[in-house]
Structure formats: structure tokens, C-alpha cells
Amino acid sequence: MRTFSKSSKLDNVLYDVRGPVVDEAARMEEQGTHILKLNIGNPAPFGFRTPDEVIHDFRNAAADSQGYSNSKGIVSARKAIMQYAQLKHIPNVSMDGIFTGNGASELIQLSMHALLNSGDEILIPSPDYPLWTACANLAGGKAVHYICDEQSDWYPDLEDIKSKITDKTKAIVIINPNNPTGALYSKELLLQLVQIAREHELIIFSDEIYDRLVMDGQKHISIASLAPDLFCVTFSGLSKSHMICGFRVGWMILSGNKALAADYIEGLNMLSNMRLCSNVPGQSIIQTALGGYQSVNEYIVPGGRIFEQREFIYKALNDIPGITAVKPKAAFYIFPKIDTKKIPIINDTQFALDFLKSKHVLIVPGSGFNWKEPDHFRLVYLPRVDVLREATGKLGDFLSTYRQ
Ligand code: PLP
């Protein structure tokens, strides 16, 4: 009998949102076990709520959103994104250089497909948000990972980046604020990254979906604002800042020297037209969401949930013998290190699986973020402090005897 296999295009793509640990958690849940899930950056299930005004506008928009829109998005949405880009000092942004998408995810995939030929290289951080690596490889390119240095607040290692540039390197991806490390890049660092891109004539892709979730009074700087002479693509969306991952609202902004990328932009336009348009009711709330009062600001200051949960998780993890973690400055993830001399671990997926089976807590092993050593894991600190206390208590208890 004829059977069907997945396309060979997927052969060198490593991306499995489920994977053995999540599959096991699902199996355990089916059997009635309660699992504490610290694996997913999805705020709504943890009691975070989008402003009522956004829901209200989404509801009202549904009736008038029955047709396809312009493939890049409705005018009011793109205008609001353009004004947002102006406030972030992103240069040379025009309405036809703004694309709305079904989440930033769709546009990340589209941007890689439009750019990469077989063998083209693109620099991507390690650890990364793994969709970038998967999309680059699926598009036929080659993701080349540069190291982010835990000793330096998880900043990209500039020498490592330079050493990995070849004549096939077309672009560099930065994720700022960062998932999974929670790092926030300084202006000095961004200028150095721009200089590397300038010297080697690279496109800059900047994933800034957490730019409105920055703590400690710091300000997020868009790298595109520092690179008017280069071609930049900046990604963002409402999933995280407005706690509406399920609405699938994202965008990308082309900026800087667009003449360098006229042919590439034609490719982006083609692919954008091919998917017709993004979810129209979702587009219609962008103006409401980006304007006026920003409820997310309440979460990220002292007394706010994300801030206080960050304070708690940072201390609780560092109090566990054998665990150290850099304090996240933004987003809602932390990427702790396991001292594998004290706690011998050679396979981080096995560690996550054993922890799940033993304590019913779900975390993601570092290898899920293209981190090469088996000595890290990512934890989402969206749950309330009492839940985080329970989870870190269980982790400390588990690691006190765990050996591989
Ligand atoms: N970029 C980063 C760094 C993310 O962490 C995520 C989601 O977790 C996305 C992009 C995808 O966002 P969206 O929901 O807009 O597709």
C-alpha cells in the first residue's frame, strides 16, 4: 500500500514544539495527573488579561471583517504600526513597508523564504527562539549559530559572530529582548552589532516582540534606529504585550536603506500576496492596542506580577545548590545553568523528562533552544508566586539526589 512521508525539506529542520517531554506530559495528563506547566510563553492561561477595550473592539470588528484585506493589512493598523515605529526612531518607514501577519511567526517564515537560497548562511543566536533556526533551514538556508555569553549578561559574543561570517552570510538575526534568556541589549552593544553588519553588508532581522516588557526602568532600543544606512526588518506583535497570543497579531517593518534590498522586497511582496492577508479582526485592534493606556506597564514595575515573579524566581533558583541564573531584564523567561560537575547531567532532555515524571513539573531543556551543552533549561515565570514556589521547591528537592 502507498504510504506518505513528510517532505525531505524538513530533513534538516530541528523543531518540535511537542517533543518527548511535552508528549509525556500530555500522556500523564490524560491519565489524570496534574502537571505544572512552566514551558510556554502564553500569558492568558496564567490569569493575565488583555484590556477590555481590545476585546470590545475585536468583537465589534468581526462583523465588518468578512472580506480579505489588502495583503499587507488595513490602513488603520499599518498607520498605527508606522507611528509606533516613529516613536522608536526607526528611519525611513513607509506604509508599503509594513506587513501584518498571523503572529510574528508567519512573517519570520515568510522573510526567510523570500531571502535564502540553498547554502546561504544566516547568523542566529544560541540560545535562540528556535523558530528562527527552523525557518532558515526550511527555506533552504543554513542557520549558523553565534554564542550569547552568559558571563556577560547573555550578550552576543561579537568575536564569535565575526569568526562565523563567510562570503555566504546574508544576514544576522538578533532577538532583543531575548527569549529564552531575558537579556536586554544596550545601545553600545547594538551599535557594535550594527558596525559588524555594516562592514559585512548584512541584513539585520530584529525580533522585538518583548519590547514592551522591559523592567527596571530600562528602555528598549530598536536596532533599526541605529542603522539608517542598512536594510533592517523589525518584528513585533501583540501576543505578549497584550496577552493575546491566540488572536495571532504580528507585524514586520522594513526600514533603512531599502534600495539595497529592492529585489528582496519584491519577494516579500510576492509571498505576502500569496497568503492573501492576515486575520482581519486581529488587524483591526492594532490601533486600539498600540495607542493610549498600556496595561502591560502595570505588570512590569515593583508590585506588578511579572516584576514580582521575576524577583522571586531569580532568587529561588539561585538558592538551589548547583543552579545559577542571570537575572532577566525583560520578557518572562529565565535560562538557568546547571553545574554539571555537581549534578552530573549528560542529556538535558532526559533530565527534563525525569523531572517531569518525578515531580510533575514541565520545563524545556536548553537543547530546545539550539544550546549545545546539556546544562541549561528554560523556565517561564508567568505563574503566580505560590505556584513558582511549589515548582522551585520540587526542583531543589529533585536535584538534591538526581544523577545521570
Ligand atoms: N519571537 C519570539 C522571540 C517569541 O518568543 C515568540 C513567541 O513565543 C514569537 C516570536 C512568536 O510570536 P507570535 O505569537 O507573534 O507568532
Image (cartoon, rainbow, N blue to C red):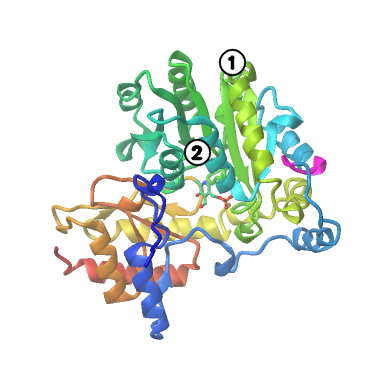
Percent x, y of residue 245: 60, 58
Q: Visible in this render: residue 66?
A: yes
Percent x, y of residue 367: 30, 51
227 in the magenta segment: no
Q: Is the residue 253 above or below the residue 278 in the image?
A: above
Picture disc at residue 229: 1
Q: Visible in this render: residue 336?
A: no
Disc 1 on helix, strand or loop?
A: loop
- On the picture, is 75 further left or further right than 267? right
Q: Residue furthest front?
A: 1
The part of the chain drawn in magenta is: 71-76
Percent x, y of residue 142: 37, 34
Q: Amino acid at mark 1?
A: Asp
Q: Nearer the viewer, residue 267 or 294?
A: 267
| Comparing labels 2 and 1, the label whose residue is closer to the camera | 1
Residue under numbered circle 2: 176
The local crowd at label 2, few if under 14, some if 14 to 19, many if 20 or more residues have their Cα within 10 Å, is many
Q: Quadrant of the N terminus?
A: bottom left
Identify the residue at horizontal 39%, vertical 55% (top origin).
Answer: 314
Tell me which corner region of the image, top left, top right, bottom left or bottom right, holds residue 351: bottom left
Identify the residue at horizontal 28%, vertical 75% (top origin).
Answer: 357
Q: Is the residue 41 above or below the residue 181 in the image?
A: below
Q: Amino acid at mark 2?
A: Asn
Tell me which corner region of the image, top left, top right, bottom left or bottom right, holds residue 146: top left
